Image: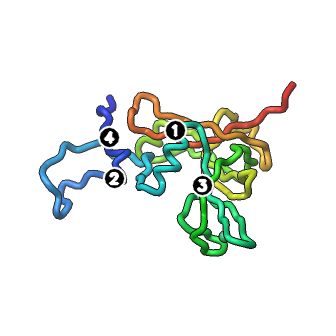
């Protein structure tokens, strides 16, 4: 059975394997099951995760003259022109599939419980390319360039898992 969740996933502590001989370690904390799917958050990235919890995918867009580039993952500066005049923008949630890989084995908890899954790179309608996961699509139906739309996966029974943007196919209306 899974151990009761803690709040550490939202405290900015990156998950790591327990190490009984870690130097400087304080007292014997009970060994927690390591998890590798919880993002470390800080004051900057918190905006992104809070929006995700509301079902909104945020990008960063440069406001510098002559640039205007959008980027993802979020940074405090523009990776194209290095301007720090960058602001948050809500993405449309539309994307196309650039490439993917079906993962059949992952030894990092809790991903092993999720295999097989489709690790993917998608091109957001606004331009940036994003690492994500494609869901609700049989492997045989995956196609480069297929239209996708974001949805947000929330943890089930975990308590601490943030909403994570994943993508599902947009089917042609009948
Ligand atoms: Zn720029």
SS at mark 4? Answer: loop
Q: N-terminal of the two: label 1 or label 3?
A: 1
Kindly report which numbered mark, 1 or 3, lies closer to the viewer in this rendering. Answer: 3
- Residue drawn at x 50%, y 34% is 154
Front-most of 137 and 67?
67
Of discs 4 and 3, which sits in the foreground?
Answer: 3
- Relative side of 10 to 29, left or right: right
* 29 displayed left or right of 145: left
Which is more toward the observer, 22 or 75? Answer: 75
Residue at the image point whose x is 67% and y is 65% from the top:
63
Q: Are marks 2 and 1 in contact (CB under 8 Å)?
A: no
Q: Earlier in the sequence, mark 2 or mark 1?
A: 2
Give the alpha-carbon distance from disc 4 to disc 2, as whole Å: 10 Å
> Comparing marks 3 and 2, which lies closer to the viewer?
3
Q: Is residue 163 left or right of residue 22?
A: right
Query: Mark 4 or mark 2, which has the lower sequence index?
Result: 4
In the image, which disc is placed on residue 88?
3
User: Which element carries disc 3, helix, strand or loop?
Assistant: strand
Q: Residue furthest right?
A: 174
- 31 vs 61, nearest the viewer: 61
Residue 13: which numbered mark, if any? 2
SS assignment at label 1: helix
Which residue is label 1 attached to?
53
- Residue indicated by mark 4: 7
Q: Which numbered disc, 1 or 4, marks the residue closer to the eye? A: 1
């Amino acid at each position: 059975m899974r151990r009761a969740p803690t709040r550490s996933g939202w405290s900015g502590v990156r998950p790591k394997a327990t190490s009984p001989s870690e130097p400087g370690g304080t007292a014997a904390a009970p060994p927690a099951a390591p998890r590798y799917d919880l993002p470390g958050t800080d004051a900057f990235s918190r905006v992104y995760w809070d929006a995700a919890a509301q079902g909104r995918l945020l990008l960063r867009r440069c406001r510098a003259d002559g640039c205007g580039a959008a980027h993802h993952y979020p940074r405090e500066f523009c990776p194209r022109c290095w301007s720090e005049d960058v602001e948050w923008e809500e993405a449309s949630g539309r994307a196309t599939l650039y490439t993917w890989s079906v993962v059949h084995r992952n030894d990092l908890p809790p991903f092993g419980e999720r295999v097989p899954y489709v690790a993917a790179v998608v091109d957001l309608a606004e331009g940036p390319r994003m690492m994500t996961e494609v869901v609700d699509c049989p492997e045989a139906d995956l196609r480069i360039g297929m239209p996708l739309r974001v949805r947000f996966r929330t943890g089930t029974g975990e308590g601490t898992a943030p909403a994570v943007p994943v993508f599902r196919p947009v089917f042609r209306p009948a």
